[in-house]
């Protein structure tokens, strides 16, 4: 992630219309704001996963992710698994380690990528 110069701003993510994404099971709801210019645009998201959500793909994108509520399970393509509870975060670079998210209880996340 390269953070190029852009003006100071405040974002109220609760005022941003949410978009729905169906997982292998369950739903993901994103509230997304973009900052800066392409190709170095930064995406900031509040993401909510319903209980029983399982992603339908292996993600190669780098993220800084903070679990705000619930519990998130993240599996790496090599088989390792990690559990994040509220207040925990993970960081991964672009194309570093493919990962896939799921949750049995539901989760609310803040993600920058």
Image (spheres, rainbow, N blue to C red):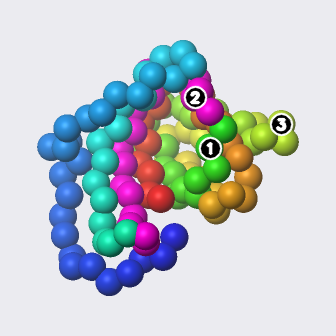
- Residue at image coords 29%, 42%: 31
Residue 52: in sight, yes or no? no
Q: Which mark is residue 55?
A: 2
| Distance from the alpha carbon under mark 3 to that under mark 2 | 15 Å
The residue that appears at 30% across and 59% down in the rendered structure is 34
* Number of the label disc, if any, that sits on residue 79: 3
Q: Residue at x 66, y 38 (%)?
A: 58
| Relative image position of residue 90 (x, y in whole percent) | 60, 53
Q: Nearer the viewer, residue 26 or 39?
A: 39
* Residue 113 coordinates in the image, percent (x, y): 47, 59
Whole-angstrom CA distance, mark 2 to mark 1, is: 9 Å
From the viewer's perspective, tell me whether residue 14 is left or right of residue 105. Answer: left
Q: Residues within 10 Å of mark 3 (few under 14, many from 20)?
A: few
Image quadrant assignment for residue 78: top right
* Quarter holding residue 57: top right
> Is disc 1 surrounded by few (<14), some (14 to 19) or many (20+) residues within 10 Å?
some
Give the mark toward the camera: 1 or 3: 1
Tag 1 residue? 59
The magenta segment is: 39-57
**On the picture, is 42 further left or further right than 24?**
left
Report if the CB atoms under discs 2 and 1 are less than 8 Å apart.
yes
Q: In the picture shown, does residue 78 fall above or below 1?
A: above
Mark 1–mark 3 Cα distance, whole angstroms, equals 14 Å
Q: Position of residue 7 (x, y in %)?
A: 21, 79
The disc placed on residue 69 is none
Closer to the eye: label 3 or 2: 2
Q: Secondary structure at mark 3?
A: loop
x and y, in percent, of residue 2 in the image? 48, 76
């Amino acid at each position: 992630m390269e953070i190029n110069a852009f003006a100071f701003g405040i974002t109220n993510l609760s005022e941003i219309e949410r978009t729905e994404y169906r997982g292998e099971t369950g739903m993901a709801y994103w509230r997304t704001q973009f900052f800066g210019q392409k190709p170095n645009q930064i995406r900031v998201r509040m993401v909510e996963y319903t209980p029983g959500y399982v992603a339908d793909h292996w993600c190669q994108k780098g993220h800084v992710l903070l679990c705000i509520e619930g519990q998130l399970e993240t599996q790496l393509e090599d088989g390792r698994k990690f559990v994040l509870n509220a207040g925990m975060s993970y960081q991964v670079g672009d194309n570093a380690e493919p990962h896939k998210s799921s949750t049995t209880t539901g989760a609310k996340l803040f993600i920058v990528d």
